[in-house]
Amino acid sequence: MSLRRRDLLRRSLAGAAGAAGALFGRKAAAEENAPPSYPAGPHPGHALPEPVVHSPYGGPATPPAHLSAASLDALLVPPPPDPSGATRTREVPIWVNEQPIEVAHDVRFHAWTYNGSVPGPVLRATEGDELSVSFRNLGMHPHNLHFHGRHDIEHDGWQPIPAGGSETYRIRAEPFGLHPYHCHALPVSQHIARGLYGAFIVDPPGGRPPAHEFVLVLCGFDLDGDGRNELYAWNGVAGFFTRFPIKVPAGDLVRLYVLNMVSGDPVASFHLHAETFDVYRSGTGLEPDEHTDVVTLGQAERAILEFRLPRRGRYMFHPHQVHMAEAGAMGWFAAI
Ligand SMILES: [Cu+2]
């Protein structure tokens, strides 16, 4: 059907070009200044591939059928902030496991996980808290746990912890913002691409205004080991937020913690349809850095975004690197 449509389009374009050529030709003959002529069909060396027809929701990647709307809540909805704002010591158990996970319907990925999921658990603290991270490597390869942000270099987490080994990292939560954590064992590209990363929210001492909060970590999955991602996903499951839109009350403040942990693509982005948002780059300030509808993030870059959806309905979101959107990273907010 599409081929027939393209042929028809080509013929009609050729006809239009012919008609235009005839019109311009008379003028050109008079002025000896003929406009360039264009071939009637696509150049053989520049033929466009047949378009892939997607579902109305924009992607061939669908989530595993057994998942329900709440299946990713542990990764989507962050732990609540500490209302007291007082600093304290937090015990954080983290382990590495090497295991297959389902990243889309009928698609298994041989992942390396923190605490059994990709991305790993959402960690949250108040600026100044002390994290006592008890790390266990239950995998078959050396791994470790490296935090972004500011901390004691003795606990930077780049030293490999052998299979079966353990370590306690003492991390002071600062500065406030949104920081990634990830494995730093060599080769780092492989350890991150396999899924060893997550989001760490550090609240400012006075907190942030109340809002409906969500964490969106962009993941890429190289399924065939060719160094290129075949699948992309917010919070680890391709097509999840296409199937299950994120519900927010219309008019309420929404706060997104967005982190790009895709390996293999130099940049990604978050784009919201039909509304604009405040951007707090890395979340390390209390005044927005810009107001826009697309924020571009290099590898491990992140931002806190705030917006309100004014009227009920569906608002699409996706990376503006549309190959990512078309391969699993499309999603919706449903303002209710
Ligand atoms: Cu690792």
Image (spheres, rainbow, N blue to C red):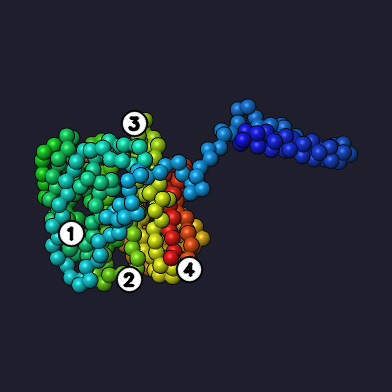
Within 8 Å: ligand 1 and the Cβ of disc 2? no
Looking at this view, is 303 or 94 the one in front? 94
Marks 4 and 1, how far apart in space?
Answer: 39 Å
Marks 3 and 2, how far apart in space?
Answer: 43 Å
Q: Which residue is mark 3?
A: 225
Name the image quarter holding residue 222: top left
Q: Are marks 1 and 2 in contact (CB under 8 Å)?
A: no
Mark 4, mark 1: which one is toward the viewer? 4
Query: Along the polypeptide, which appears first: circle 4 or circle 1?
Result: 1
Mark linked to residue 172: 1
The amino acid type, in three-letter code, at marker 4 is Pro
The amino acid type, in three-letter code, at marker 1 is Arg
Looking at this view, is 240 or 176 the one in front? 240
Quadrant position of the N terminus in the picture: top right
Looking at this view, is 217 or 58 the one in front? 58
Q: Secondary structure at mark 4?
A: loop
Q: Which residue is mark 2?
A: 210
